[in-house]
Image: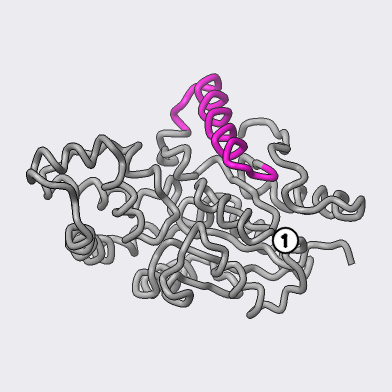
Amino acid sequence: MNRIEGVILDWAGTAVDFGCFAPVNVFIDIFHNAGIEVTMAEAREPMGMLKIDHIRAMLSKPRIANLWKEQYGREFTEADVVQLYAEFEPALLASLSEYTTPIPEVLETVQVLRERSIKIGSTTGYTKIMMDIVVPNAKAKGYSPDHLVTPDETDSFGRPYPYMIYRNMEELKLTASWKVIKVGDTTSDIKEALNAGVWSVGVVIGSSEMGLTQEEFTALTDEEKEQSIYTTKQRFIENGADFVIETMGELPGLIERVEELMEAGRRPGSCVGVEVETPIA
């Protein structure tokens, strides 16, 4: 009885799109077009949220809010959020198919989980119209989870609300939250998992939190890789992750460890900050 029944994966930065670059570049562009220069870090900070919520969160940051007031002589309004999103969506849709390549070790890991009869669910900060592009392109490259829930199916209550996870559990017939693991690459993913009462796992390499392309990461020295991995791990731990793994290839081993903890009576939230130590590739 003490076994994991389902794993729910995020999409960009976790399963596909190494570094989660598809939305980041568009966020920077739409703010630039509005006369506001935002940094890569500012564009990434709310990553994982429903994209209109992401824009609202960026505008609410003091530095960006002040720049907006200087540019327009007033504070931003909900109409401004809607206008920026109206520019964001078509720009993202135009390039989204280019960012659907599975991240290394994802396909092999999913195969291992399926051999263990573990269901694969998924949640995302993308809307259904966006996922209508991502899903078939990722499937053509070998990645296709058993179920997908977008914020459109939860009345636009995306992360950090837990409802997308609950919809996955219902569809996949998962019997209890403590028999479910959520894996993601942003602090929004971690908060979603915590609110749902499932095991929360942050994945480091390829994540939006790390924010590097595969080529940039590969080009780092061993010391630079260690520092980047450590910094990213700490952000997940500070936000309450039960576990942090470096790559998706570590997930099957982590599941075995979680099942041992479950057998001992441990539940999500009781192992915050525990890491799976593996050598850097």
Q: Which residue is more in the foreground, 206 or 179?
A: 179
**Residue 148, x across and y down, in percent:** 53, 73
Q: Residue at x 62, y 40 (%)?
A: 246
Q: Residue at x 34, y 74 (%)?
A: 129
**Residue 208, x across and y down, in percent:** 45, 44
Q: Is residue 244 left or right of residue 123?
A: right
**Residue 276 highlighted magenta (yes or no):** no
**Residue 216, x across and y down, in percent:** 41, 34
Q: Residue furthest top?
A: 223
**Residue 233 highlighted magenta (yes or no):** yes
Q: Residue furthest right?
A: 264
- For mark 1, what is the residue? 112
Q: Which residues are magenta?
A: 218-243
Image vertical order of residue 139 relative to residue 184, above or below: below
- Quarter of the image with the N terminus is bottom right
Q: How is the image coloured?
A: one colour
Type of amino acid under label 1: Val
Q: Residue at x 58, y 50 (%)?
A: 190
- Quarter of the image with the C terminus is top right
Label 1: state its secondary structure: helix
| Quadrant in which residue 226 is drawn | top right
Q: Main secondary structure of the magenta part?
A: helix
Q: Which residue is more in the foreground, 66 or 50?
A: 66
Image vertical order of residue 183 relative to residue 236, above or below: below
